[in-house]
Image (cartoon, rainbow, N blue to C red):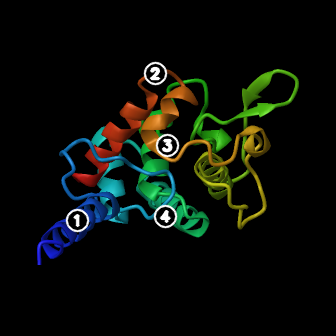
Amino acid sequence: MTMKKPLIFFILFMIAILAYVQWGLGEVPGEEMYGIMGKGRATEQMMFRYIRHYNTQVDSLQLRYLIECYLWEAAFEGVNSDVAFAQMCHETNFLKFDGNIDITQNNFNSLGTMVYDMYWACFFTMKEGVRAHVQHLKAYGSKKPLKNPCVDPRFDVVKKGSVNLVRNLNSKWDGLEYGKSIEKKIDMLLSM
């Protein structure tokens, strides 16, 4: 009879640990860890409202098409659409394109190329630019092969599966706070 109590306690303890790890029970609000791979939670309407909150000048039809591209391309490759969309918002300043890249390049994550010196990649269509962005995220987040033909000019130089969480992008992309900045944008996106 005395052996049953420790065994029952051990089993309950292991169930609690598995629940904590598997389902994220006990997470601290604002400290969610966003995976690069997986299913996003933001809807098309949430994404639309999020961009329009920061950029009222963006064309509604083009924005709806862009969102559709992100949702479709991310789902097809298994990339978290919330992550891809939030990163696009960060890189383009909510489609204002007030940095080094302009809208005609269809480059939504400041992808460079490796031709002579680095310069910003250009894509023929919006969909192709989104596909390149999603493929670039997949390169970091997974070791699985692409489902679509590769259009990301830097796909082959990324160590596949080297970053599984957004917060770990700090060491791979633009600065020490990069991942945290994307996480904040995801939090805001999901609150729309």
Q: Earlier in the sequence, mark 1 or mark 2?
A: 1
Number of residues whose C-alpha sits closer than 10 Å to that of mark 4, classed few (under 14), some (14–19) or many (20 or more)? many
Q: Nearer the viewer, mark 3 or mark 2?
A: 2
Give x and y (percent) for residue 147.
71, 67
Vertical side of 96 occupied by 127: above or below: below
Q: Nearer the viewer, mark 3 or mark 1?
A: 1
Q: Which of marks 4 and 3 is nearer the N terminus?
A: 4
> Where residue 142 is drawn, which disc sits there?
none
Determine the CA span between mark 3 and mark 2.
18 Å
Determine the CA span between mark 3 and mark 1.
46 Å
Determine the CA span between mark 1 and mark 2.
41 Å
Determine the CA span between mark 2 and mark 4.
28 Å
Mark 2 is on which residue type? Leu
Return the residue at label 4.
71
User: Image point 26% across, 59% down: which residue?
Assistant: 20
Vertical side of 146 occupied by 116: above or below: above
Mark 1 is on which residue type? Phe
Q: Is mark 4 on a helix, strand or loop?
A: helix
Q: Is 92 on the left or on the right of 15, as rendered?
A: right
Total marks shown come to 4
Give x and y (percent) for residue 109.
57, 39
Return the residue at label 3.
88
Q: Is residue 17 visible?
A: yes
Return the residue at label 2.
176
Mark 3 is on which residue type? Met
Q: Which of marks 3 and 2 is nearer the N terminus?
A: 3
Number of residues whose C-alpha sits closer than 10 Å to that of mark 2, classed few (under 14), some (14–19) or many (20 or more)? some
> Where residue 10 is drawn, which disc sits there?
1
Number of residues whose C-alpha sits closer than 10 Å to that of mark 1, classed few (under 14), some (14–19) or many (20 or more)? few
